[in-house]
């Protein structure tokens, strides 16, 4: 049931010279339901109709009629539309019953390929709290676009290449201890990396050795490749523990190294288009015309850079997936890099550069002293998640529940994810342990708890999906507000995808839980009247379904018992 579509149809019949998408944008949802469920301001019709907006609204209100609306009313320059409640109730609840875990989904994407490059940590470096954002936002976007009917390709563009590996091999050859690394890979590798950088200050010959090792790695020499593979494997085994905790997987692990032999075409194209110019110690693309510093393509020793590999990766993705969108979920520190990348692709004549999107985000920080940094002064994402689980275990310690380990993980990790996805991704935020784990307020546990409470209510009330429901019994204002929220879920998912903002969904869920919990506090659901009970349980089931689907889109679990 498309209420907005109906409004557009009604208005189109009355006003000439108006286009559909323009109208769609004009339709508002009034903050106060007393002003209608939808409102349309008449200001923009004044010119063509040569009349004052409130006159137009008044005249339209008198002539418009539709079974979709109980009432269409003019209030000053606004037209207010009041949904036909009976119609909405039946339509929404039937939709939920039919679609269940697909309720809210659509086929907007028409199976087009959409690439999401996210998480993408660096080998032999810490998978730290900063990566939480890309990982969690990217995973949610992936779920959202899947739900919208796209064929998503989740890419982990691992930072597994570059001259720093020459340094790392040099350090390993001098001081490496395989046993220590096997036990505690990344902190040990980090130590080697820090040490070699320090010592190279005094002893520049270390840098020569490093360059030589990197050359040997590029040339595919056995020992260099063997060590690089080893560093990559031990790092991945650490990363995979985190992905497992978060229940995230990838369709492609093609990181930077994958492109090490695929850059010739890019460099050749840049040469053919006369875009390469020598600069101090490098060959660059000059971007002065676009008010940007130059993009570095090659260093004087011939070695390529992060940017060059990203150009090659974009080529490869276009060739392999002919993508509808190629999305990079990477922090705002790399704004310039992606602007340069897309500009250079444009200069190369690739019209698909327009389909490449950088989805940036702000910083996350932990207040000092809230977590022991067991492994040096970096905060590892894994430790953050383990801490969340531990703290949750304490909170649920005396609840009567079977698998407390699993529940603590579902709640604790979910709480971290929810906090991460509760605000505009562009905003910076500070980790707040007490707030995020609270069962009250705008939190993950609160939403999950509402879900679990409904589950037990449905069980107690012997709810059956096949039961006949008398929709006309759902006539309370509070019920109508809940139904409108459920009805709006699909649009929220579409908007979240459109703006790359998962927080639209988390906010939608909180609003739904608040509406439902206040209804629950004021209304008995398990009443003696069987029909009334059934209709209220049916509404509760619909709420549960939206919560569950929404949590799934955020990348969270929806426990049945809490
Ligand atoms: N490894 C990079 C980092 O940790 C992120 C890579 C993002 N993806 C890309 N195609 N550049 O900062």
Image (spheres, rainbow, N blue to C red):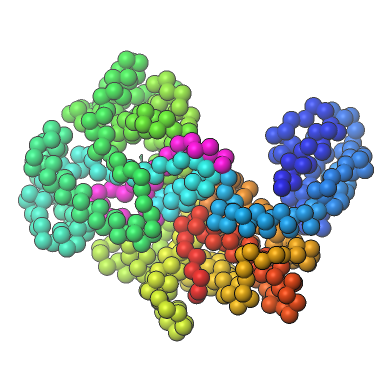
| 108 inside magenta stretch | yes
> Residue 555 at what x, y percent from top left?
46, 57
Which quarter holds ligand 1?
top left
248 horizontally vs 278: left or right: right
Depth order, front residue of 468/369? 468
| Residue 114, image quadrant | top left
Residue 335 visible:
no
Residue depicted at 26% across the width and 57% down the height:
238
| Number of numbered callouts drawn | 0
| Residue 181, image quadrant | bottom left
Depth order, front residue of 146/200? 146
Residue depicted at 28% across the width and 44% down the height:
159
> Residue 131 at what x, y percent from top left?
37, 53
Q: In this view, does 273 lie above or below 553?
A: above
217 horizontally vs 119: left or right: left
| 292 inside magenta stretch | no
486 horizontally vs 144: left or right: right
> Residue 345 at what x, y percent from top left?
40, 26
Depth order, front residue of 188/140? 140
297 horizontally vs 485: left or right: left
Q: Is residue 65 above or below residue 283?
A: below
Residue depicted at 40% across the width and 42% down the height:
153
Magenta highlight: main SS: loop
Identify the magenta region. Answer: 107-133
Depth order, front residue of 187/327? 327
> Residue 191 at what x, y percent from top left?
18, 56
| Residue 228, image quadrant | top left
Residue 131 visible:
yes
Q: Is residue 345 above or below residue 254?
A: above
Residue depicted at 18% across the width and 43% down the height:
165
């Amino acid at each position: 049931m498309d209420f907005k579509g109906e409004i557009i149809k009604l208005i189109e019949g009355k006003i000439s010279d108006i286009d559909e998408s323009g109208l769609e944008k004009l339709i508002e949802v009034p903050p106060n339901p007393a002003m209608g469920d939808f409102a349309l301001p008449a200001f923009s019709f004044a010119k063509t109709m040569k009349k004052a907006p409130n006159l137009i609204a008044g005249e339209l209100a008198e002539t418009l009629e539709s079974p979709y609306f109980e009432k269409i009313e003019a209030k000053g320059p606004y037209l207010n539309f009041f949904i036909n409640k009976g119609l909405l109730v039946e339509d929404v609840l039937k939709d939920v019953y039919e679609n269940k875990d697909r309720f809210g989904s659509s086929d907007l994407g028409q199976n087009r390929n959409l690439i999401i490059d996210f998480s993408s940590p660096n080998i032999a470096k810490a998978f730290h709290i900063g990566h939480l954002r890309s990982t969690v936002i990217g995973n949610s976007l992936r779920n959202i676009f899947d739900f919208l009917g796209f064929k998503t390709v989740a890419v982990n563009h691992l930072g597994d290449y570059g001259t720093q590996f020459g340094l790392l091999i040099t350090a390993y050859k001098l001081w490496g201890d395989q046993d220590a690394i096997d036990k505690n890979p990344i902190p040990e590798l980090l130590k080697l990396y820090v040490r070699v950088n320090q010592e190279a200050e005094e002893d520049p010959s270390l840098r020569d050795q490093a360059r030589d090792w990197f050359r040997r790695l590029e040339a595919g020499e056995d020992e260099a490749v063997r060590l690089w593979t080893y560093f990559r494997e031990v790092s991945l085994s650490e990363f995979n523990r985190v992905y497992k905790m978060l229940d995230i997987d990838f369709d492609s692990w093609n990181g930077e190294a994958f492109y090490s032999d695929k850059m010739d075409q890019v460099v050749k194209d840049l040469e053919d288009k006369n875009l390469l110019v020598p600069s101090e110690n490098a060959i660059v693309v000059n971007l002065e015309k676009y008010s940007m510093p130059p993009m570095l393509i090659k260093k004087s020793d011939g070695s390529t850079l992060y940017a060059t590999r990203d150009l090659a990766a974009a080529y490869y993705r276009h060739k392999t997936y002919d993508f509808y969108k190629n999305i990079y979920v990477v922090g705002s520190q790399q704004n310039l890099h992606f602007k340069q990348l897309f500009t250079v692709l444009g200069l190369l004549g690739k019209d698909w550069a327009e389909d490449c999107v950088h989805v940036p985000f702000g910083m996350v920080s932990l207040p000092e002293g809230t977590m022991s940094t067991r492994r040096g002064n970096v905060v590892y994402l894994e430790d953050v998640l383990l801490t969340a689980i531990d703290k949750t275990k304490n909170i649920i310690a005396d609840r009567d529940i079977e698998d407390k380990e699993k529940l603590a993980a579902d709640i604790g990790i979910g709480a971290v994810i929810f906090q991460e996805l509760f605000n505009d991704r562009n905003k910076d935020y500070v980790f707040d342990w007490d707030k995020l784990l609270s069962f009250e307020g705008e939190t993950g546990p609160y939403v999950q708890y509402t879900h679990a409470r409904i589950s037990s209510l449905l069980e107690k009330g012997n709810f059956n999906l096949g039961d006949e429901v008398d929709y006309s019994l759902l006539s309370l204002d509070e019920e109508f507000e809940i139904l409108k929220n459920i009805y709006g879920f699909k649009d929220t998912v579409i908007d979240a995808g459109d703006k790359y903002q998962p927080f639209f969904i988390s906010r939608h869920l909180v609003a739904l839980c608040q509406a439902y919990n206040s209804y629950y506090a004021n209304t008995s659901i398990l009443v003696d009247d069987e029909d009334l009970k059934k209709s209220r349980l049916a509404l509760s089931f619909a709420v549960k379904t939206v919560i569950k689907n929404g949590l799934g889109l955020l990348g969270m679990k929806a426990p049945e018992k809490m």
